[in-house]
Image: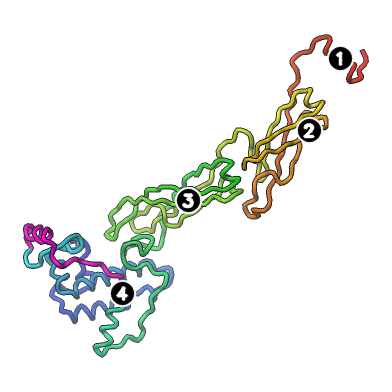
Amino acid sequence: MGVDYYDVLKVPKTATEEDLRRAYKKLAMRWHPDKHPAAAKVVAEAKFKQICEAYDVLCDAQKRQIYDLYGEEGLKSSYYNVSSPSAAARRGAANKGTSFRYNHKDAEDIFDEFLGDFGSDGGSDKGRSPRSENANFGSGNKGSNNRPATMTGKKAAPVENKLACTLEELYKGSKRKMKISRILSDDSGKPRTVEEVLAIDVKPGWKKGTKITFPEKGNQEPGLLPGDLIFVIDEKPHSTFKRDGNDLLIHQKLSLLEALTGKVLNLNTLDGRTLTIEVSDIVKPGHEILIPDEGMPISKEPQKRGNLRIKFDIKFPSRLSSDQKSDLRRVLGATS
């Protein structure tokens, strides 16, 4: 039968309408989330939801009859003929489409209806708790997750996944959509697989190791809230640039002639521009040119950038002819 609604309200199956009202009032007042501290609110919400659902079914004669005949799943799954418990009658009623179908109500709506009815009968609604704006009551998509009544306030272990980004994406920023699959528990505690698409806004300047956390979007374990899902930025290798903090580093090869006589460099930036750099000074091995504000964006100060550093590697000839050596001595002022 699944959940035993009589047991939830702590009443016998012979309970009268008045018995149900008294039991519901006592339990709903006790478990209303607004009467509990933040640490116990999750358990209280789940318990309150179950109490309201039990009362909604048992206080309605037609719903109660179907529940007594076919149980919770029978009540919620299809159309039923309350006049006969036979399988044939159930199938026949479903095919014909009888007028009854169970509709789940929001827990707070049931609570509000009850208090309204109770007040009209001469009772009092003093001490009535207002609806909490942050409470996850009801079914469907009203809350982030369905939470069984036995759940504690603790979360399952977080799940981490790498999010590989190109250097261009980390330079300009990008929007990524990630399809995830995770395990959640339904209201009865049974595991079910849920698929979802999450949007990630990669900010310019984010570094390798940056973490993006989606609270309670991980897997769920019995008795625990879903864990957090964490994406960790990873950086793909680039064919031209290497990142060094907020700086970009490039190794530029020069021949010995170019190192001595100069060279004009044309470099394509990560955002598609072309930098023209004139090297006019003599370049020694290990020499480095620094170009301000042409490095990576600084994530906490997007208007600022690091530097572009160009390190030179000088390619020396493997051998020289006698005439070449003589010419070099003459040009460089060496004596024989």
Residue at image coords 20%, 66%: 102
Q: Secondary structure at mark 1?
A: helix
Q: CA distance from mark 1 to mark 4?
A: 98 Å
Q: Secondary structure at mark 4?
A: helix
Residue 191 location (% of width, % of height): 30, 53
Question: Which residue is tagged 4?
Answer: 109
Q: Nearer the viewer, residue 1 or 146?
A: 146
- Amino acid under label 1? Asp
Q: In terms of sequence position, does the residue under pointer 1 or pointer 4 come before the other?
A: 4
Q: In terms of sequence position, does the residue under pointer 2 or pointer 3 come before the other?
A: 3
Residue 103 in the magenta stretch? The answer is yes
- Amino acid under label 3? Ile
Q: Which residues are magenta?
A: 85-107
Q: In terms of sequence position, does the residue under pointer 3 or pointer 1 come before the other?
A: 3
Q: CA distance from mark 4 to mark 3?
A: 36 Å
Residue 34 location (% of width, % of height): 39, 75
In what quadrant of the picture does the N terminus appear? bottom left
The answer to whether residue 328 is above or below residue 186 is: above
Left or right, 32 with respect to 325, comes to left
Image quarter of residue 73: bottom left
Q: CA distance from mark 2 to mark 3?
A: 46 Å
- Amino acid under label 2? Val
Question: Which residue is tagged 1?
Answer: 327
Q: CA distance from mark 3 to mark 1?
A: 65 Å
Q: In terms of sequence position, does the residue under pointer 4 or pointer 2 come before the other?
A: 4
Question: Which residue is tagged 2?
Answer: 279
Tags 3 and 1 in contact by the CB under 8 Å rule? Answer: no
- Amino acid under label 4? Asp
Question: Which residue is tagged 3?
Answer: 230
Image quarter of residue 331: top right
